Amino acid sequence: MIVTNIHDLIGNTPIISFTNNEFEEIPLGSTVYAKLEFLNPGGSVKDRLGQHLIASGIEKGLINSDTTIIEPTAGNTGIGVALAALKYKLKTIFVVPEKFSQEKQDLMTALGAQIVHSPTEEGIKGAIAKAKELDNQIENSYLPLQFENDDNPDTYYKAMGPEITKDLNVEIDSFVAGVGSGGTFSGLGKYLQEKIPDIRLIGVEPVGSILNGGQSHGHEIEGIGVEFIPKFFQSLDIAGYETVSDQEGFDMTRKLASTYGLLVGSSSGAAMVAALREASKLPQGSKILTIFPDGGEKYLSKDIYKREEY
Ligand code: PMP
């Protein structure tokens, strides 16, 4: 395959299937499918978002050739937006809570972005507040704000849904996916629910996130977990949430790497834990779809594959 630019390689990611041969938790005849989003050029599910946020901002007249894009991000959205911004030669500034992985910040910088830190203890809310402040100060800036912007779920509705229909020529019984901004879960969830009205939508969160009524606190699994219920969930029929501990998530992340060569991040490990729980609840022959949002290389400094205790 020959392409003229990297942007054309975003999307059309493959799906890997697992059965009882790989995981004994999967009943005989059932299948867990995982879409491998780390195979996007920027290494995550958020390349699609970056592309769609900027294209849509231009289409709506909110972005011109001198606009500075500002966004609060834990990292992958920044990488995706920075990548997309290069296509249009736009400046980017990302507000990142300090604790987040250094590799992600280095990658955003490599893609030409400027990083501004917000205090770790203020979480993503602190990053949003700081980004809004910068947006007010900087002339001709655009704050896509993935947490509030319907372009976020739209990305996955439009750019990922049809890929699933094309590749998975099966009725999916359950869609299980991590919730950070909630864009992937709600966008793809809406698409799938329209096609398969009785599909079960199961959100995945780490311990320390509030979806199952838990207390909000820090966690080691990166990219998922919320301090407030995403606004995109309002029109969705959600069957429930699976809460995964850091220990379970990282044990699975190590297993996926060391047994199956899947060098994924910890939110993929958590998604797999939840997908296996769901598979074990459903009758034999069920089909469960999950997403592996990013790769593990970005977390090597955190000993993602080495640390055994969390
Ligand atoms: N996993 C990782 C590694 C992520 O960076 C994100 C985005 N924060 C997610 C999962 C969750 O995706 P979403 O924001 O679409 O809920």
Image: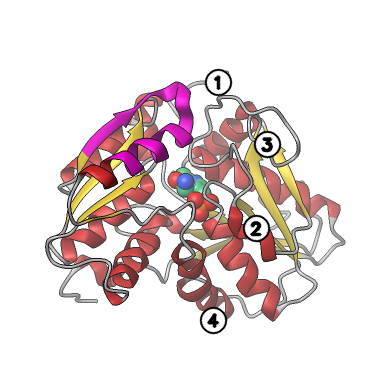
Question: Where does label 2 land, which residue?
Answer: 233
Of circles 1 and 3, which is in front? 3
Q: Secondary structure at mark 1?
A: loop
Spatial separation of the CA atoms under disc 4 and disc 1: 39 Å
Circles 1, 2 touching at the beta carbon (< 8 Å): no
Give the side of residue 193 with respect to residue 127, left or right: right
Question: Where does label 1 land, which residue?
Answer: 308
Q: Secondary structure at mark 2?
A: helix
Circles 2, 4 touching at the beta carbon (< 8 Å): no
The residue lying at 54 percent from left, 81 percent from top is 166
Disc 4 marks which amino acid? Lys
Please say if 45 is above or below 244.
below
Spatial separation of the CA atoms under disc 1 and disc 3: 26 Å
Whether 131 is among the magenta residues is yes
Question: Where does label 3 land, which residue?
Answer: 210
Spatial separation of the CA atoms under disc 1 and disc 2: 35 Å
Whether 100 is among the magenta residues is no
